[in-house]
């Protein structure tokens, strides 16, 4: 399927400020700042297993498009959400941010957007298929 593959982060924008705004501790932000996050996706129809390897942690979420699933956030919080597909983009609303993920050629592009008193900020992570 289209998303299945392994991807290594090659660039990210607004990393520090975004993670601060969603409540990730400074020491965790520091550890991950220059780490080449690896994302592994297994897609079987509408079923996904989505794993991201961070320093000292691997986060794995399993979900089915348009069905409620338990998801873990970047800050480690678990919650229930319905992941949807819109025009080839995977979309999910986390408790304090929204995320869309799409493929562009051999690139996986993740955009996470937080809106609050300080305005709207989007962290963009681009990963290449390896």
Image: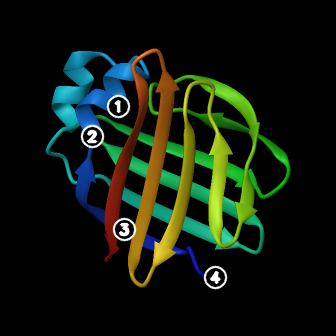
Classify mark 1: helix, strand or loop.
Answer: helix
Image coords of residue 84 (percent x, y): 75, 55
State how far apart marks 3 and 2 are (Cα).
20 Å
Mark 2 in CB contact with mark 4 (< 8 angstroms)? no
Q: Return the x and y of residue 7 as percentages of the image width and height.
A: 36, 68
Q: Nearer the viewer, mark 4 or mark 1?
A: 1
Mark 3 crowdedness (10 Å alpha carbons): few <14, some 14-19, many ≥20: many
Q: Is residue 117 left or right of residue 8?
A: right
* Among the 4 quarters of the image, the one containing residue 25: top left
Q: Which mark is residue 18?
A: 1
Q: Secondary structure at mark 3?
A: strand
Could you tell which of marks 3 and 2 lies nearer the N-terminus? 3
User: Are the two marked residues, 3 and 2, in contact with CB atoms closer than 8 angstroms?
Assistant: no
- Calculate the distance from the C-alpha at mark 3 to the C-alpha at mark 1: 21 Å
Distance between the Cα atoms at labels 1 and 2?
6 Å
28, 104: nearer the viewer = 104
> Is label 4 in a helix, a strand or a loop?
loop
When asked about the image quadrant of residue 65, the answer is bottom right
In the visual, does 27 lie left or right of 21?
left
* Residue 14 versus residue 27 in the image, above or below: below
Label 1–label 2 contact, CB within 8 A: yes
Cα distance, mark 2 to mark 4? 30 Å
Crowd class of label 4 (few under 14; some 14 to 19; many from 20; radius 10 Å): few
> Closer to the N terminus: mark 3 or mark 1?
3
Q: Position of residue 17 (x, y in %)?
A: 28, 28
- For marks 2 and 4, the one nearer the N-term is 4
Spot occupied by residue 9 in the image (x, y as percentages of width and height): 28, 60
Q: Which residue is mark 4?
A: 1
Q: Which residue is mark 3?
A: 7
Labels 4 and 3: the sequence-earlier one: 4
Instruction: Give me the C-alpha separation between circle 4 and circle 1.
Output: 31 Å
The residue to which callout 2 is attached is: 14
């Amino acid at each position: 399927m289209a998303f299945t593959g392994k991807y290594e982060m090659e660039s990210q924008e607004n990393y520090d400020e975004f993670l601060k705004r969603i409540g990730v501790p400074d020491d965790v932000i520091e550890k991950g700042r220059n780490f080449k996050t690896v994302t592994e996706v297994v897609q079987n129809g509408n079923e996904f297993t989505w794993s991201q390897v961070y320093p000292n942690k691997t986060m794995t979420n399993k979900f089915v498009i348009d069905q409620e699933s338990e998801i873990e956030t970047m800050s480690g919080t678990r919650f229930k959400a319905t992941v949807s597909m819109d025009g080839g983009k995977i979309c999910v609303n986390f408790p304090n941010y929204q995320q869309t993920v799409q493929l562009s050629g051999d690139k996986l592009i993740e955009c996470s957007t937080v809106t609050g008193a300080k305005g709207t900020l989007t962290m963009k992570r681009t990963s290449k298929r390896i």
